[in-house]
Image (cartoon, grey):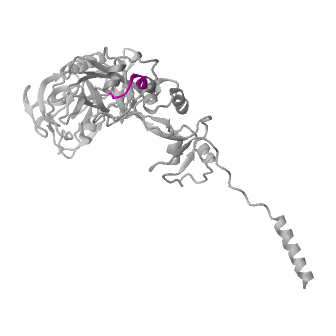
């Protein structure tokens, strides 16, 4: 019996000895850590930190990229020499390398390394910036802007601190180094309603609800001013006009040229305080591809110089931005039901002229006549004042209505005798103003409906589908 037991034990021992060792779970790579937030996906995190999805999965021993939970810690590979916990912030108005360095107390060289940035122009509004957490430190929020002749000592007294603390927190060479208009940070709570960004103190907040801007779109720039401040500015190369919204904020509406190349462009904002002091800042904003068709269509031959002259004439008519806003909510359909669209805003057009190809775009939406019983009535898309009625070479019989704040609607190709309003007349949304015709440069009867916002043609369908501001 004992012999049989020893033989069995010997065989079992051989079997266990021959069994391969169990595979050990690889140890995750070391490096800085990101804490997954609700709504994050692994692909989004990879893009945010500029690493490949495979590298992120490998560094964290992840086999299924769809298995991710909020609060999970992920090692971010490829950031040699960086440790600790990483967060990401959306770049907002007023944010610069310097303001991020001062507010977060993270050296700018570390910020540029983490974000693979080489130029300040890469830091545009709406982009993500990686920020390492600094131990138990919290972001500074109390913004100060030196006025001309104001010393760091005077600012320190107002902020209940000392000039040496201000110099240290803001990486200044000394207590003499504060420049007028610079944005500094001090200990303590921010002023009431002031956001924690790098804006000069005259700008309590700046928002653009529809970033990124798009070709042929309407940009909204909403500013919350300090008491008594007035604003002006420039987007790309167009001067901005700001109007009060009735809730303490001011807004500028600006059309974005449909043939503007996608990319980042400067937005400059200027504030004038009641004492005459001026504060300014410039920020890069992204302009993306618009909704316009991408394929050019043939059009009947015409002289492009005549078209250019007519566009300049219309631009001069719609140049004024009055302080009255007539519309509320969305604009309404300018034709009766049923309707059909024969051509869209922004359609590229190529026109042979003098041995060359002239490139331009369709500046409105064409509402066609789609059946024998189709309605021919034209209605005002929004309330406003009629500022032009008459015949133009390409657009034929035209009505132009000033809807306020630099916004204009234009109704073209109306029937001879089919304009039912006069210059100076006030109209309401949905009011009958004309009759569809085939005057001007056309191949058949239709309404050519245009919109201009601060001197630039925009896609009218945006205004029929969205509320501005």
297 falls in the magenta region: no
Q: Nearer the viewer, residue 88 or 185?
A: 185
Q: Magenta part of the protein: which range?
A: 159-166
Judge whether residue 161 is colored magenta: yes
Position in image of residue 104 (x %, y %): 45, 33
Q: In this orientation, does residue 313 appear?
A: yes
Q: Is residue 28 above or below residue 117?
A: below
Query: In the picture provided, is 321 more to the left or to the right than 73?
Result: left
How many labels, in total? 0
338 is higher (above) or lower (below) than 49 = below
Q: Position of residue 399 (x, y in %)?
A: 15, 28
Of all residues, the one furthest to the bottom in this rendering is 1
Q: Position of residue 416 (x, y in %)?
A: 12, 28
Occupied quadrant, residue 204: top left
Residue 192, given in percent of the width and then of the height, sits at 27, 35
* Location of the C terminus (image quadrant): top left
Q: Nearer the viewer, residue 340 or 90?
A: 90
Q: Residue at x 40, y 16 (%)?
A: 356
**Rendered view: 75 above or below 246:** below
Decide if residue 260 is in sight here: no
50 left or right of 243 in image: right
Q: Which quadrant of the figure contains the N terminus?
A: bottom right
In the rendered view, does 20 fall on the left or right side of 191? right
Which residue is located at x 28 percent, y 36 percent? 193
């Amino acid at each position: 019996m004992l012999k049989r037991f020893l033989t069995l034990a010997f065989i079992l021992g051989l079997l266990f000895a021959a069994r391969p060792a169990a595979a050990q779970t690889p140890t995750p790579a070391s490096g800085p850590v990101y804490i997954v937030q609700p709504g994050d996906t692994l692909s989004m995190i990879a893009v945010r930190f500029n690493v490949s999805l495979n590298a992120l999965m490998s560094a964290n021993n992840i086999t299924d990229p769809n298995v991710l939970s909020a609060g999970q810690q992920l090692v971010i590979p490829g950031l040699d020499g960086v440790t600790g916990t990483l967060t990401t912030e959306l770049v907002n108005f007023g944010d610069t390398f310097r303001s991020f360095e001062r507010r977060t107390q993270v050296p700018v060289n570390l910020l540029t390394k983490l974000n693979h940035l080489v130029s300040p122009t890469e830091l545009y509004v709406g982009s993500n910036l990686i920020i390492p957490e600094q131990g138990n430190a919290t972001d500074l929020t109390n913004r100060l802007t030196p006025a001309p002749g104001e010393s760091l000592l005077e600012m320190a007294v107002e902020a209940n601190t000392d000039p040496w603390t201000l110099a240290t927190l803001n990486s200044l060479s000394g207590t003499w180094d504060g420049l007028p208009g610079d944005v500094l940070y001090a200990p303590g709570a921010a002023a009431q309603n002031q956001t924690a960004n790098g804006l000069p103190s005259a700008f309590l907040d700046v928002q653009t609800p529809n970033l990124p801007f798009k070709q042929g779109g309407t940009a909204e720039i909403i500013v919350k001013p300090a008491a008594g401040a007035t604003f002006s500015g420039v987007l790309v190369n167009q001067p901005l006009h700001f109007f009060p919204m009735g809730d303490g904020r001011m807004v500028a509406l600006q059309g974005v040229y449909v043939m503007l190349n996608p990319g980042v462009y400067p937005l400059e904002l200027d504030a004038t305080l009641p004492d005459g002091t001026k504060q300014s800042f410039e920020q890069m904003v992204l302009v993306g591809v618009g909704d316009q068709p991408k394929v050019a269509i043939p059009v009947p031959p015409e002289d492009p110089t005549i078209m250019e002259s007519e566009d300049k004439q219309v631009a001069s008519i719609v140049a004024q931005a009055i302080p009255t806003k007539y519309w509320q909510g969305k604009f309404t359909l300018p034709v009766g039901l049923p309707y059909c669209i024969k051509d869209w805003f922004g359609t590229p057009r190529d026109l042979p002229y003098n041995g060359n190809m002239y490139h331009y775009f369709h500046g409105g939406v064409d509402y066609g006549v789609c059946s024998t019983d189709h309605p021919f009535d034209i209605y005002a898309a929004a309330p406003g004042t009629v500022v032009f009625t008459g015949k133009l070479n390409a657009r034929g019989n035209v009505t132009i209505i000033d809807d306020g704040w630099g916004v204009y609607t234009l109704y073209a190709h109306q029937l001879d005798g089919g304009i039912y309003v006069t210059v100076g007349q006030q109209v309401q949304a949905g009011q009958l103003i004309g009759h569809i015709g085939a005057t001007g440069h056309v191949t058949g009867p239709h309404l050519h409906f245009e919109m201009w916002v601060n001197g630039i043609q925009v896609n009218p369908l945006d205004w029929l589908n969205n509320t501005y501001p």
